[in-house]
Image (tube, coloured by chain):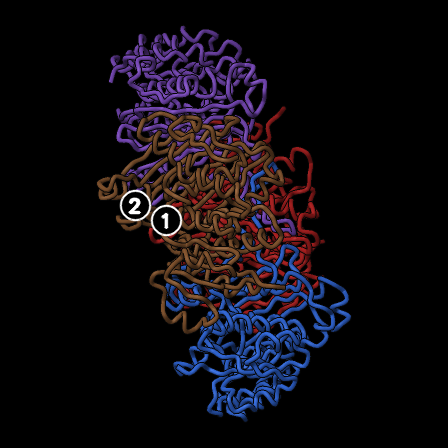
Chain colours: A blue, B red, C purple, D brown
Amino acid sequence: MKPLNIALLGMGRIGKIHFKNIQQHFPEVNIFAVADPIYDPSLTEKYKKIVFSRNAQEVIALPDVEAILICTPTSSHAELIEKGIRSGKHIFCEKPMDLSLERTAALQAMAAQAGIKFMLGFNRRFDPDFMQAFKSVRAGVIGDVQIVKITSRDPGLPPLDYIKNSGGLFLDMAIHDFDMARYIMAKEVAEVFAKGLNLVDRAVGEAGDIDTAVTTLIFEDGTYAVIDNSRKAAYGYDQRLEIFGNKGMIKVENNLHNRNIIYDENGIHHALPLDFFMDRYANSYLNEMKLFFEALKYDKPMPAGGADGFKAMQIAYAAKLSMQSGLPVKLSDPAVNVNQVP
Amino acid sequence: MKPLNIALLGMGRIGKIHFKNIQQHFPEVNIFAVADPIYDPSLTEKYKKIVFSRNAQEVIALPDVEAILICTPTSSHAELIEKGIRSGKHIFCEKPMDLSLERTAALQAMAAQAGIKFMLGFNRRFDPDFMQAFKSVRAGVIGDVQIVKITSRDPGLPPLDYIKNSGGLFLDMAIHDFDMARYIMAKEVAEVFAKGLNLVDRAVGEAGDIDTAVTTLIFEDGTYAVIDNSRKAAYGYDQRLEIFGNKGMIKVENNLHNRNIIYDENGIHHALPLDFFMDRYANSYLNEMKLFFEALKYDKPMPAGGADGFKAMQIAYAAKLSMQSGLPVKLSDPAVNVNQVP
Amino acid sequence: MKPLNIALLGMGRIGKIHFKNIQQHFPEVNIFAVADPIYDPSLTEKYKKIVFSRNAQEVIALPDVEAILICTPTSSHAELIEKGIRSGKHIFCEKPMDLSLERTAALQAMAAQAGIKFMLGFNRRFDPDFMQAFKSVRAGVIGDVQIVKITSRDPGLPPLDYIKNSGGLFLDMAIHDFDMARYIMAKEVAEVFAKGLNLVDRAVGEAGDIDTAVTTLIFEDGTYAVIDNSRKAAYGYDQRLEIFGNKGMIKVENNLHNRNIIYDENGIHHALPLDFFMDRYANSYLNEMKLFFEALKYDKPMPAGGADGFKAMQIAYAAKLSMQSGLPVKLSDPAVNVNQVP
Amino acid sequence: MKPLNIALLGMGRIGKIHFKNIQQHFPEVNIFAVADPIYDPSLTEKYKKIVFSRNAQEVIALPDVEAILICTPTSSHAELIEKGIRSGKHIFCEKPMDLSLERTAALQAMAAQAGIKFMLGFNRRFDPDFMQAFKSVRAGVIGDVQIVKITSRDPGLPPLDYIKNSGGLFLDMAIHDFDMARYIMAKEVAEVFAKGLNLVDRAVGEAGDIDTAVTTLIFEDGTYAVIDNSRKAAYGYDQRLEIFGNKGMIKVENNLHNRNIIYDENGIHHALPLDFFMDRYANSYLNEMKLFFEALKYDKPMPAGGADGFKAMQIAYAAKLSMQSGLPVKLSDPAVNVNQVP
């Protein structure tokens, strides 16, 4: 069978992971081209068959390339998506599509109307534990699902420069949890109430952002999700779910560094959770690629697409607005109700 | 030393627990009188030294009685408290003081101005695990306390008649959690946002109540509590805390029926949480009495008093209002800002 | 109904627990007499109806006394049991019956042939968690029971004087676990292999005892129990079971001081196990009495009797012998095969 | 830097894992040759640079090959080790070196006297959790290490043909645990007492083997290890350690399929342990290779060598003998005390 030719755009932290995962695990996928303005020259030496380029637009245009993986900085996502769509390529794009809600809507519409497949890299959906929870919920293990509580606390502050350009906590961090809430509940959000605080580091506040937040999402049927976020949990990366239904509850606990327990005169001590997102979500990155390639190969729907990207972004904007106004914000509010293609 | 003479008003479920606990554990306390319109006649036989009466007012007036324990139905609390205060008796009263916010404020003021000691039976504050969490927080184990998340789900619906007269989920059930939030955070609430649902049983909705709720409390410094309530968790009584600070987190887990774990081909199985409140909080009822009697003996402040009762009630009213209006409600809102004595 | 008249012999630590438990929980049981050479004089003041005596033999002889509770030091157990049997009284005796295997056999035979009921206070059998495990095993939850592993480590060394007169680790400490093994497996032991060490404190070795041991018990059908003992676990009192069957496993875990979990930058910390035997086994003492009184009231067999006492003692002697010889010892070995009444 | 040229002998289940791991994770290692009597022909197509052969002896002799990985059936290990040593190649060999104790001793001596490096694939030593426990013990976390308890139960019977030729439970299965005991305790075993049973399947007994065993290892200083083995635990693969020292205890728990917990009306349910050894020990196989290649590159001692292989085998023979005789067997016993090179 002919392998699938892909182009990898961006060889930063995430791009390198996808590169390595594809090399190791997907013999039927061929990395045809790689684009990065500052890629490591030793790569060209090692991978002589791969086309290396500093220009992503050029690479997208290559006729042999069937699908592109967009792993560049956020600010370039929109134009690369557009180019990809216009060139008729299938697209995997790291989240977000764009920081502007309008442009996200426009991109989503464009992708939906084009004949291409589009997947957005909401990595948490593809974590084996969360996938298992999703499966259990869908299988009716806890009956009718009523509430999801999401704990999502980072192990430490990102660089201030990142914070300044990220759109803020709701748009760059909580957005994962907004997507998770929609994924687990399989319902649409109708209203958002959010509170934000600057508790971790004053510099975050001076940069115009918050570092701590609690958000209540009300779904269309009145059921809800509660999400608490912090940029820094002293004990590491805290990523948990609690899903409540009329027949029971599913908890997804953290994945600890090891399964050793130390008993001494001071107590009983377990290891901390995995605290680097690339370790914590190592399997997600692999599953993501697996599902992307499978969807292309067997013409299946993408497990997370443009509409998911738009809706999570819309919730994030509503959360921001709610925090600013002190009031709940409906998604039908014109401020966040930008037209998109269903 | 002369024993403390008390009168026990009401010999229902809770009254009996206090009666038994005092008999068994407090040799320095003398149950001088018991009042109940329908008390068990065998008691008079067995406890010949105790004055039994059908009239609580009369019992309160007995000159020998130094303190009263009000364990009667809620509707009679207010007048018994008033009588107790006027008679100069110390008072332990099961929560709530009254279902009316105004009258609660008035009672609180009256108790504060009189020379008596007043304790309100918020039983959860006196659970050994929650007390230990309180102690750890105050000792700085998790640094500055920022967030408390409370899970409070009952094992099953109370009788519909109870629901109809209880004031509803926020006033009779969530009020415990509102008090817990204030207790753990040791701060005052400024604003409340609540959502309520009827998911467990349609009859609850027809009786004008909800059975599922999520409430966000915003404290004066912007930090918050998130509380989720359900009248019925399929897996039993779910009573947990998660307290987050800048140096760590404290979780208080459920107390299970036993410490046996069964491994079989289907999984690894633990016992369910204790599911009857009298088992789950058996130690609370004992600790409550211990602290009440100690406060009287050593002239110490009561661990939960009239102001605590009023404030929890005020939050409950604000939650109800928020649910009805769909908007956050400030405690400074005239609708819930009833004057009380500081 | 006429209450049961009992006499309590010995008002040391354990005697006081039984006294209090009976007063609080068994209204149908009347403590008719108490014997102790140095009982607290304030008791006579407080409990005027109780006959207090310095002479246990005299108290046993009182015609009104129907059952006796022997809570005196071990050295006096045998003669008090004998007196009780001769006086036709039912007997509850703290373990052991005697430190001599021959005398234990003789006492067991005497009790079996007399018309009285005899219970031995193997407190661990009556712990709610172990009772639950027993029940699950008997109910077939793990299929055919094949192996039991017992972890039994004390929180600290007893006084050296105690060690010198206790018969040593196998006779005073491991004997509980030997009984537990027989109780859980519901089979008889055929052979014992034991190793002992002096690791905790040199003084124990100088006093002629060990403080650390591992014992393998082989049952008549070849299945086995493994027991590890230590006089001192740095992390407290470690009392666990693991029962393995062809359909699964039951673990009984320790009962911790509280159910709080602290997360900080160093790890995830749980509280230590309850470390004082009177706390850890508080419910056992209560259950013991309950079952003793029920057996008398409803003429049921005692849950642990003289034969159980003898057999555990026999295993303990075999363990001691095995440790000394370095070889496994069969219970049919004449050195430990003392005649008893089946 | 010049890559290390290795030859992989045997492309069965384990050989394939090593092949894949080396391809994916060790760019500085070159698989120069592969030998297997029935290797997959598609491999020659795909890996054109690799020398494929049906003759392991020939492959070992290739001058370019610097190290060999012996992953062939046990019966061929000895002669391939000999050939490797004579050809001056470094050797990684899956355990055991040979089923004969004498030949194992001879091979160990031969390897020790030759100038080559020899590593034995005791996979459990290289599991991240067990490695972490080893590190903690060596770092003094639990003080002086006194006891190790090993639970090692397989998820199911191997094929009867395997059992017939494996040397039996002690030689093919418990040998891992004997090695683990030496590894964790870092002491030598002096005496062995073992009991074996046929409980899982009568066919095992008819094939002359046992399927259930308990073994006590006594180290030279009197401290001990207790190991319980079963060919089949109903609940899956049970691989745990409990290491007891004078300052505390380390438990290594099973690695579960996921970190989801389901609460329903029947209990609280966790997933079962990983039950296929290739999943459970996936990281071990990778770590093994890492340490083997590092030892070669930096001229470090091998983490598990011929002496470890011999000593575990010696314990296994002693266990077998003990089971047969019903008596403890000293390793100084001539029956198992075969000369080897220290």
Q: Position of residue C96 (x, y in %)?
A: 40, 17
Residue occupied by mark 1: D74
**What residue type is disc 2 on?**
Asn
Looking at the rendered structure, the secondary structure element under dot 1 is helix
Asked if disc 1 and disc 2 are in contact, CB closer than 8 Å, the reply is yes
Q: Position of residue A52 (x, y in %)?
A: 61, 82
Discs 1 and 2 carry the same chain letter: yes
Residue C144 found in image quarter: top left
Which residue appears at 39% of the width and 50% of the height? B268
Mark 1 falls within which chain? Answer: D
Nearest the eye: D198 or D334 = D334
Location of residue C262 with respect to A80 vertically, above or below: above
Nearest the eye: D280 or C156 = D280
Location of residue A45 with respect to B176 vertically, above or below: below
**What residue type is disc 1 on?**
Thr
Residue occupied by mark 2: D165
Q: Position of residue D73 (x, y in %)?
A: 36, 52
Location of residue B261 with respect to B317 vertically, above or below: above
The disc, 1 or 2, on the residue closer to the chain's N-terminal end is 1
Looking at the rendered structure, the secondary structure element under dot 2 is helix
